[in-house]
Structure formats: structure tokens, C-alpha cells
Amino acid sequence: MVEKFDAIIIGTGQSGPSLAARLAKEGAKTAIIERKLFGGTCVNVGCIPTKTLVASARAAYVARRGADFGVTIGGPIGVDMKRVKARKDEVVRQSNQGVENWLKDMAGLTVYEGHARFEGPHGVRVGDGVLEAERIFINAGARAYVPDMPGLDEVEYFTNSSIMEVDFLPEHLIIIGGSYIGLEFAQMYRRFGSRVTVIEKGGRLISRDDEDVSATVKEILENEGVEVRLNAECLSVAKQGHQVAVRLACETGPKDVVGSHLLMAVGRRPNTDGLGLDTTGIEVDPRGFIVVDDQLRTSVPGIWAMGDVNGRGAFTHTSYNDYEIVAANLFDGDPRRISDRILAYALFIDPPLGRAGMTERQVRGSGRKALLGKMPMARVGRARERSETQGFMKVLIDAETRKILGAAILGIGGDEIIHSVLDVMYADAPYTVIQRAVHIHPTVTELIPTLLGDLSPLE
């Protein structure tokens, strides 16, 4: 049986539902297909549940520090992991069911539940039926990448998805992977009360960022008792009784790390291998990501790829922006492009890192004349009031145009404060616009103008 539509969307992650609503509003007969969980990674096993867990972990951390603020709490601080998980599950349920109900109640939209697989460039099989449309939008997302590591098939391990089901406190959680996902879980479980060891194959954590950022993040985590092992070459794992042993060769420290549980957090891979793309002619890169142009079009006319599956953002906010770009080009006569957006992201440890634009390393590599402003968070009154003075703020300026090239704010409120810089960057305005602004005291953001008033040449 073949049913014809004007448009088909594969996946209900961040960009899919909003595009479905816009297509339906424009009068297009639309189908959307979901294989497993409505809302995709962010809603179910990504942003929303992890940040909910981070909030519980911070509550435990703040409670333990009560005496520092003159607050006395009777008895030791305990963490009820079953209640922590139940709270997380309830927050996820609200979001997941909200997306599902929104889609199923949407006029002009038909929801299919099942695995989607292409049968040619205009047909998609779901179960026993085939859907056909001239416009197809792939929003299939990504999943945890599990490397071919010696011994890994012989031990139990978590990924960022399966660890969402944990309702107990691991005695010693070993995390392989020193980037964003791994570090958020590292601090989180350390604050819950686990011993935590992070193992990173490279020479520093979050290697995409500048060395001063990596070093300070490492210091923040180690100050809370997270153990960090770098330069871990020739990794392998093995059972050791009821525990797991990770074998590594590092410059310092023992060659084995033995723990009760293992979390693999070494990256993501696109959900393209089961889509039947070989029947369409859609081009994919060596890692399996769908190749798209500046307006999210694939190599096959009439097929677009949005979100994690295209490898052009890998964030919830870039996925939503993919929807905005597609909708603007299709319906608004507004030629928006991926290249219009400025890279921005956050690391949600505590204190968080907010990043926008170029890193210092990239600016140096560009060969342009630049100015640098840098300030420790210890100079920020709000940070001192909260006794949260770890981190720093850094902004890079083009010396000739006076435009902001990039910024890193690692410290209290950094994930929010970065937007004051980012908005000026999108306005394509000189840094003096924010440098001359009068910000509210006492806040963290008020120090951005001060920072910009004390720039030095980038040597």
C-alpha cells in the first residue's frame, strides 16, 4: 500500500516537529515518522535529562557547602538516587509527551511510529506501508559512538543513553572520554558521591577549546575530587571479578584503573546506517554524516537533512536553526544559510563554559592582528558574593575592524552571559557597542565592558 504526501519528515528531534507545524500551516499534507522516542535525543537522553540531573547534583553540592555560608544543616547530606531519577523521569515525561501530543493533535499531519527506510528518492517504507512525497526531510539524529576497543565486548558499560536508567550510586565510575558529555557526567556523579575517574586519550580535556580553558576545566574538576588521566594510549578493558579494569599507558600514574562501572563517552555517530540511503543516491561523508549544502539540501533534489545527522552543528540549538533555515528558504523568500550562524555552545559543568565564535588558537592561526581581553572571575563581585570564583572571561577582537571574533566565559553564569557577546557579534557591531553599555550592578555581565576597556595586542 502506497500513501502519497506533500512532505515526509523522518524523526521528531528538535527540527522535525517545528517543520511539521510549518508545513501543515502552509497547507502541505505531511507525514512524520518516529522510530522510538518522541522529541529525539535532547528531550529523552540529552539536554533535558542531563541538565535535570546536573541540577540535583548541584543541590547536593550547595547543601554540603552550607557551613561556608553560615548555614547549618543537621546531619550528613544524603542523595536518594531513586528520587533523583524519578525527578528526571518526570521532567522528561512532560517534554516527551508534550511533543507526542502536539504532533498527534496537529491538523494536516499524520504520525507514523516505526522504522523508516528509503525505497528510492521519493519513497519511505514504514512497517508494511510505503509513503511517497516530493519533499523529504531527514531528522534522524545521532547516537553514542562505541569504538572497537579491545575487551569492550566482554564487559558491561553505559553510554549517555543507558546511564539515564541508573537509579543507584556507582561506587567508582570510570568515564572514557574527556569532552563535553563525559565531563558533565563526571562532575555530576562526583557530587552525588561516587568516586570518578576520567580517562582521555589526548593530552588535555575538551581539546577543541584553548589550552587555558582545558587546564582550568581540569582544575575545577580535580578540586572536587574527580581523577583525570590524560595521554591514555592503547586503551583496553577487561573484567576483574565484579569490577572493570581499564588498561592504559599514561605519562604518570598506574597503568590500570579499576572501577565498579564504565561509561563510554567518546563521541556520537549519525543514525544513517539503517535508512537505506544507498537507494537514493544521497552522498554521505566517511563518518556517515549526510552531506548538505549551505541551505541543508542533500545531493538529491527534494531531500533535506537537518540536525545531528548532517554533522553541521551537533547541538539542539543548531538543529532548531536548521529548521529555521529550511522554512525561511521554502516559504519566506529569505535565503538563510548555515554559514550565517556563529558557532556557540556551552559545557554545563559548574561553573559552566560559554563559547562563541573563534578560539584564541584559531585567531592566532588566521594571522590577523587581534586584541585580547582576559579577566579572572575572582575580580567579579557577583562571583565573590557567591564564593564561586573559579574560571575567567576572555574576548578576542579584530584590531582593524574592532569586531568581536570570539569569546570564552568559564565561570558563574558563563552559559548565559556569553549571549551578551554573541548578540553583538550577530549585529556585526564593533566591540565598543557593548564596551560603552551601562550594565546592572552587581552582576557578572557588568564586567564585560570593563574587560573590553582593557585590551592588549595578541602576541
Image (spheres, rainbow, N blue to C red):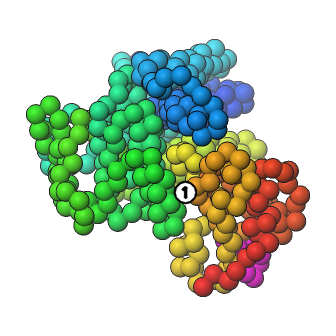
* Rendered position, 202 above or below 266: below
Local packing at callout 1 (Cα closer than 10 Å; few below 14, some 14-19, many 20+) is some
Q: Quadrant of residue 356?
A: bottom right
Note whether residue 457 is visible.
yes
Q: Position of residue 260 (x, y in %)?
A: 23, 35
- Residue designated by label 1: 293
Q: Position of residue 412 (x, y in %)?
A: 64, 49
- Left-right relation of 140 to 359: left
The residue lying at 55 percent from left, 45 percent from top is 350
Q: Quadrant of residue 101?
A: top right
The residue lying at 52 percent from left, 20 percent from top is 87
Q: Quadrant of residue 422?
A: bottom right
Mark 1 residue element: loop
The residue lying at 58 percent from left, 35 percent from top is 67
The image quadrant where one finds the N terminus is: top left
* Rendered position, 402 above or below 65: below
The residue lying at 46 percent from left, 26 percent from top is 76
Q: How many marks?
A: 1
